[in-house]
C-alpha cells in the first residue's frame, strides 16, 4: 500500500471512530500528581534513592578534582588505567592523575567510562544525560563501570523540572536523552535481580559541589 | 477452539517447571508493586491523572499523531503507517532489504510479536537476535513470550542452563553454567558481539511524545539502548495509541508504569530517542524509521464499550494479580497478550470466537481492575465479552448457568475452596466412567457444554496453593 494512502486510511478510521464517542472530548488534566518532599532535603532524597537502586556516589570539591577521583576509583576496583571519557571532559588533566583516555565513539571495550549529566532528579535518584558531539550516548552503556559527573547545583526536584531545563537549553530535542537510574539489571532468571545485564554493572556518581 | 484452550490449561497445570517459575514471579511482582505504592502516598491521585491523560489523548488521537509525525519528519526521521499486521511486516522487510541488512538486533516489543515480525524476518533470511535477556531465552527455546514484561517468566534456571548449554557450546562456552550471575554474564558476552555487528536495530516504544517527536523506551538491561544506538539503522515499531501529548504527561505515566510493573519508581533506563544521528552527534544511527501500527486499534476506538482498553500502557500488573494467569501462565491464552488485558485484546483483535474460553476463564474477582494504573474497568469489559458471546449463542446453556454459580463462589474464597474440594473428591470417587457431565463448579474453565474430564483429585485452588505456599 502506498504510504500516503495508508496514512490517510488510518487517520480516516480514527476520525470516524472519534465521531462515535461523545462530542465533549475530555480536556487535558491540569493537576500534576507527583511525590512531595520538602526542598531542603532534596539532596538527601537524591542520594538515598540513588543508593536504593545500587548506585554509589562521592562528593568532589571542584571539576578539576574529577581525574584524581576517577583514578582512585579505578585503583580501588583494580581496573585498567585507560578510560573512555566523554569529549566534554577531555580537557581535564588526566596525565596528572596517571590515566590515559579515549574519546572516540562508540567507546571501545573499555572497563570504565565517564560521562556528564545535564542534571539529576531527586524524585527518583535519576541522572539525565543528553547526546551530542561532546556526549556520546553509547558511552553510557558499553563500559562495565559507568562514572557520571554531576554538578550539585543541577539537581532538580521532579521530572517536570528536568523537562523545563531541557526546553530552555535545547531548541530541538537531542537525538537521545538517557535517564539513568542505577546500573543495568535484569530479573529474567527466576525473578532474581542481577546487576550488569547488557549495560554497566556499576554506576558511580561524582558530585561536584 | 475450546478443546485447545482446555488442553493448554491442563498441560499448564501439570507442568512442574511452570508452577515453580510462576510461583517466583507472582510473589515477586505483587509484593514489589505493593511496597512501591506504599512508599508513594500520591499514587492514587497519580493514577487518576494517568487515566485522564490517556483518555484525553485518545479523544484527540488524530491531532496528537499528526503533531508527533510532523516533529519526527522535521528531525529527519521517516514515518510509516501500517493499517494491518501484514503492512507492518512488509514495511520493515522493505527497509531491511533497502539497507542490505544481514544481522538484525531487536529490543523487546509486544507489537512486533502481535504483527508476527520475527518469523517474517527469519523467513526472509535475516539473522535475527532478540537482545532482551528474557526474549533471548525464549528465542532459543522457540517459544512465544508468556508475559508482557517478563517474557521468559515461565522458565526455571535449570531450563535456562540447558538452553544456554545447548546453544552456546558452538561459540566456545563448553562449561555448563548454572548460577544466575553466570547465566546473565554468558548471555551478556554472547550478545555483545551481536550488538556490535548488527546493521538494523528494531525496538518498540512505550510512548511517543507529540510535543517533541521523541519516542520513549523503558528498560532495565540497557539492551534497547545498544539496539537503537549501535546499528546504522533504527526502526521503532509501535501502536498508534502510544501517543502522549507532552513531556509532563509522560512523567505522570512513568510514575505509575514502573511501580505497577516491577515496583520501581523508575526503571534503570528510560530513553528518549528522536530522529537519526545529527551532524554534530558523536554516535547514533544514520537512519531512523518509526512504524505506526493500527491493526484493529482504530476499530476498537470506535467501539464505545471497549475503547477504554486502548488506555493500556502494558505494565503487566493485571497479569501479575490474576489467579488464573498465576496458575496457567501466558501460553495457555493462545495469543501474544495474556492475562486479563490479553483476554480482551485477543477477543477484540482476533475476534470473539478466536479464544472463546478466555473471558469465561475469568473469576471476576476484580483484582485486575483494582491494580490497573490507568483505571481500565477490566472486569466490566470481561463481562461485556461474555454478554456478546451469549448473544451470539456461543455457549451452551448448562455452562452459562455453571459459570454464574462459579463466579459467585469465586468471590467467597473459603466457601469456594470447601465446595470445590468436596466436589473434586466426590467426583474422583464416583468417576469410574472417566468423564463427568455438567459439573457446575468448573463452568468457567470447561465452558461449552461438553463432557468434562474426571478430576485428578486436586482442585485448582489446591494446586495453586501448593505452588505458591
Ligand atoms: S490493562 Fe492496565 S494493568 Fe493490565 S497491562 Fe494494561 S495498563 Fe497494565
Image (tube, rainbow, N blue to C red):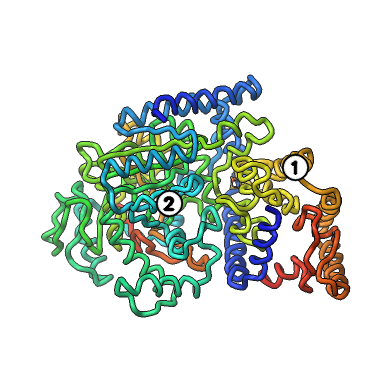
Few, some or many residues within 10 Å of mark 2 (<14, 14–19, 20+): some
B32 and B156: which is toward the camera? B156
Name the residue that disc number 1 marks.
B389
Q: Chain of mark 1?
A: B
Residue B375 position, x and y percent, is: 64, 41
Outermost residue, top side: A23
- The dot on residue B174 is none
Quarter holding residue B446: bottom right
Give the residue at x 34% y 78%: B174
Q: Are marks 2 and 1 on the same chain?
A: yes
| Sooner in the amino-acid sequence: mark 2 or mark 1 | 2
Q: How many angstroms separate mark 2 from mark 1 (CA)?
A: 32 Å
The answer to whether residue B78 is visible is: yes
Which residue is at a point 79% across and 69% down the rendered structure image? B455
Confirm or reject: label 1 Cβ below 8 Å from ligand 1: no
**In the image, is A192 to the left or to the right of B199?**
right
Crowd around label 1: few <14 · some 14–19 · many ≥20 (10 Å):
some
- Residue B52, image x and y in percent? 60, 33
Number of numbered discs: 2
Give the percent coordinates (x, y) of residue B40. 57, 49
Q: Chain of mark 2?
A: B
Q: Is residue A47 left or right of residue B23?
A: left
Residue at mark 2: B118
User: As displayed, is residue A195 above or below residue B85?
Assistant: below
Q: Is residue B258 above or below residue B422?
A: above
List x then y, in percent, for residue A203: 35, 59
- Tell me the residue at 26%/56% (across/down): B196
Q: Tell me the SS state at disc 1.
A: helix
What secondary structure is marked by label 2? helix
Check the picture and name the quadrant holding the N terminus of chain A: top left
Q: Quadrant of residue B184?
A: bottom left
Amino acid at each position: 500500500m502506498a504510504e500516503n494512502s495508508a496514512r490517510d486510511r488510518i487517520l480516516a478510521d480514527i476520525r470516524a471512530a472519534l465521531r462515535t464517542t461523545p462530542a465533549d472530548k475530555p480536556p487535558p488534566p491540569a493537576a500534576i500528581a507527583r511525590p512531595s518532599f520538602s526542598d531542603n532535603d532534596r539532596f538527601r532524597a537524591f542520594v538515598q534513592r540513588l543508593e536504593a537502586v545500587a548506585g554509589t556516589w562521592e562528593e568532589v570539591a571542584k571539576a578539576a578534582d574529577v581525574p584524581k577521583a576517577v583514578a582512585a576509583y579505578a585503583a580501588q576496583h583494580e581496573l585498567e588505567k585507560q578510560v573512555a571519557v566523554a569529549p566534554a571532559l577531555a580537557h581535564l588533566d588526566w596525565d596528572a592523575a596517571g590515566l590515559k583516555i579515549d574519546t572516540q565513539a562508540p567507546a571501545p571495550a573499555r572497563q570504565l567510562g565517564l560521562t556528564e549529566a545535564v542534571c539529576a532528579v531527586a524524585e527518583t535518584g535519576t541522572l539525565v544525560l543528553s547526546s551530542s558531539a561532546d556526549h556520546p550516548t553509547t558511552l553510557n552503556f558499553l563500559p562495565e563501570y559507568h562514572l557520571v559527573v554531576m554538578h550539585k547545583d543541577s539537581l532538580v526536584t521532579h521530572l517536570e523540572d528536568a523537562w523545563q531545563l531541557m526546553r530552555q537549553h535545547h531548541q530541538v530535542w537531542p537525538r537521545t536523552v538517557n535517564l539513568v537510574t542505577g546500573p543495568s539489571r535484569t530479573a529474567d532468571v527466576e525473578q532474581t535481580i542481577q546487576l550488569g545485564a547488557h549495560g554497566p554493572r556499576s554506576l558511580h556518581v561524582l558530585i561536584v559541589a | 477452539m475450546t478443546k485447545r484452550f482446555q488442553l493448554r490449561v491442563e498441560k499448564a497445570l501439570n507442568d512442574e517447571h511452570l508452577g515453580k517459575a510462576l510461583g517466583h514471579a507472582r510473589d515477586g511482582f505483587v509484593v514489589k508493586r505493593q511496597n512501591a505504592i506504599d512508599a508513594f502516598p500520591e499514587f492514587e491521585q497519580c493514577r487518576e491523572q494517568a487515566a485522564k491523560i490517556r483518555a484525553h489523548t485518545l479523544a484527540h488521537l488524530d491531532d496528537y499523531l499528526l503533531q508527533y509525525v510532523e516533529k519526527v519528519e522535521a528531525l529527519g526521521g521517516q514515518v510509516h503507517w501500517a493499517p494491518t499486521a501484514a503492512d507492518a511486516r512488509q514495511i520493515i522487510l522493505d527497509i531491511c532489504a533497502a539497507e542490505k541488512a544481514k544481522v538484525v538486533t531487536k529490543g523487546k516489543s509486544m507489537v512486533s510479536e502481535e504483527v508476527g515480525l520475527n518469523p517474517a524476518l527469519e523467513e526472509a533470511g535475516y539473522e535475527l537476535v532478540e537482545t532482551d535477556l528474557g526474549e533471548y531465552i525464549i528465542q532459543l527455546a522457540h517459544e512465544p513470550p508468556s508475559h508482557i514484561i517478563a517474557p521468559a517468566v515461565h522458565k526455571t534456571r535449570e531450563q535456562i542452563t540447558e538452553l544456554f548449554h545447548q546453544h552456546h557450546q558452538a561459540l566456545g562456552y563448553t562449561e555448563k553454567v548454572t548460577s544466575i550471575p553466570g547465566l546473565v554474564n554468558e548471555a551478556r558476552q554472547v550478545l555483545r558481539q551481536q550488538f556490535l555487528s548488527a546493521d538494523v536495530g528494531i525496538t518498540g516504544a512505550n510512548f511517543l511524545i507529540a510535543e517533541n517527536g521523541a519516542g520513549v523506551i523503558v528498560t532495565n538491561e540497557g539492551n534497547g539502548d545498544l539496539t537503537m544506538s549501535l546499528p546504522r539503522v533504527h526502526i521503532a515499531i509501535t501502536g498508534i495509541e502510544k501517543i502522549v501529548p507532552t513531556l509532563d504527561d509522560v512523567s505522570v505515566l512513568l510514575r505509575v508504569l514502573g511501580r505497577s510493573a516491577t515496583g520501581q519508581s523508575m526503571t534503570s533506563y528510560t530513553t528518549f530517542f528522536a530522529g537519526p544521528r545529527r551532524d554534530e552527534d558523536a554516535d547514533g544511527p544514520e537512519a531512523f524509521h518509526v512504524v505506526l501500527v493500527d491493526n484493529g486499534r482504530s476499530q476498537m476506538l470506535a467501539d464505545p464499550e471497549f475503547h477504554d482498553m486502548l488506555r493500556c500502557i502494558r505494565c503487566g500488573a493485571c497479569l501479575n494479580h490474576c489467579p488464573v494467569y498465576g496458575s496457567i501462565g501466558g501460553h495457555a491464552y493462545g495469543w501474544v497478550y495474556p492475562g486479563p488485558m490479553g483476554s480482551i485484546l485477543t477477543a477484540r483483535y482476533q475476534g470473539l470466537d478466536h479464544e472463546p474460553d478466555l473471558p469465561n476463564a475469568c473469576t471476576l474477582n476484580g483484582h485486575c481492575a483494582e491494580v490497573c494504573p490507568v483505571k481500565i474497568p477490566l472486569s466490566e469489559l470481561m463481562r461485556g465479552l461474555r454478554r456478546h458471546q451469549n448473544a451470539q449463542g456461543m455457549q451452551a446453556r448448562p455452562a452459562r448457568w455453571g459459570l454464574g454459580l462459579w463466579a459467585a463462589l469465586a468471590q467467597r474464597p473459603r466457601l469456594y475452596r470447601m465446595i470445590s474440594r468436596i466436589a473434586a473428591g466426590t467426583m474422583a470417587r464416583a468417576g469410574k466412567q472417566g468423564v463427568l457431565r455438567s459439573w457446575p463448579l468448573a463452568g468457567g474453565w470447561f465452558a461449552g457444554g461438553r463432557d468434562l474430564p474426571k478430576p485428578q483429585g486436586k482442585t485448582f485452588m489446591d494446586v495453586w496453593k501448593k505452588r505458591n505456599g
